[in-house]
Image (cartoon, rainbow, N blue to C red):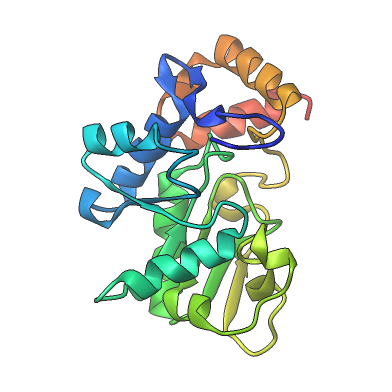
Amino acid sequence: MQSSRLPAKIFFSFFGERVINRIIRISKKITEAKNIYILSGSKKLNSALSLVVKKKNIRIFYDDEQNVYKRYKNFLSSLKKKPKYIIRITSDNYLIQPLVIKKMYELCKTKDFDYCYVRPLSHYSGEIIKSSLFLKKKTSLQAKEHVTWDFRNAKNIKIISYAENFLGIDHKKYFTLDTISDLYKMTLLEFKFPQLKQLNCLECIKKIQKNWKF
């Protein structure tokens, strides 16, 4: 809600659906509703989210507004039973693909990796992180905003970084929702590629990448 570059971006709508609702819909393609949490900042500043989670039958955790890493750490510390992995997706990544995440997770858990992502930190895939990594005591300043910064640069954990053409998508060509310029691009996409309303549409992404100037 408090994004400095594009405030309240999660409530913008594309294809007749708010960004936050699409992200929840994507999450429900990956796991059960009981496993889905929104990790938000200050409850006072983000109280509108409480209405969203109640309607969608998921849960929300309010914590530190500025330190996002601390938000994850405190969330996990509050759980009696901690999950082995967290799958992290954000509202910036409007075109994230559930099929990509499912394939990543399958490979990740089979080999017991600690941290999994697609190069170069793809906006189509999200990240998969062992929960135990968040509970370490020391973190860098960068991790406060860029939550997984320390994991990507660690030398003592088991990391897999999938290739930039994972599942046939060019992960270097992407769309995000972070600025006014991004909002303009997404509006054009909505007009030119109505099929993007779908989820699990890798062929749609490939077609756009072939016909769009990035």
Height in image: 74 above or below 164? below
Quadrant the C terminus occupies: top right
Q: Farthest residue to the bottom: give it.
A: 156
Camera-nearest residue between 153 and 147: 147
Above or below for 155 versus 90: below
Residue 114 can be seen in this image: no
Task: Indicate left or right for 46 with 162 as reference.
Answer: left
Q: In the rendered view, does 188 fall on the left or right side of 16?
A: right
Residue 185 spot, x, y in % from top left: 69, 20
Can residue 63 be seen here?
yes
Q: Quadrant of residue 107?
A: bottom left
In the rendered image, residue 186, in percent from the top left (x then y), is placed at 63, 21
**x, y percent for residue 141:** 74, 68
Q: Residue furthest right?
A: 213
What residue is rendered at 57% in x and 65% in y?
69
Closer to the camera in the image, 72 or 186: 72
Residue at 23% over, 48% down: 33
Q: Is residue 57 above or below residue 184?
A: below
Q: In the rendering, at what x and y percent does residue 104 appear?
A: 47, 62
The one of 184 and 118 positioned closer to us in this rendering: 184
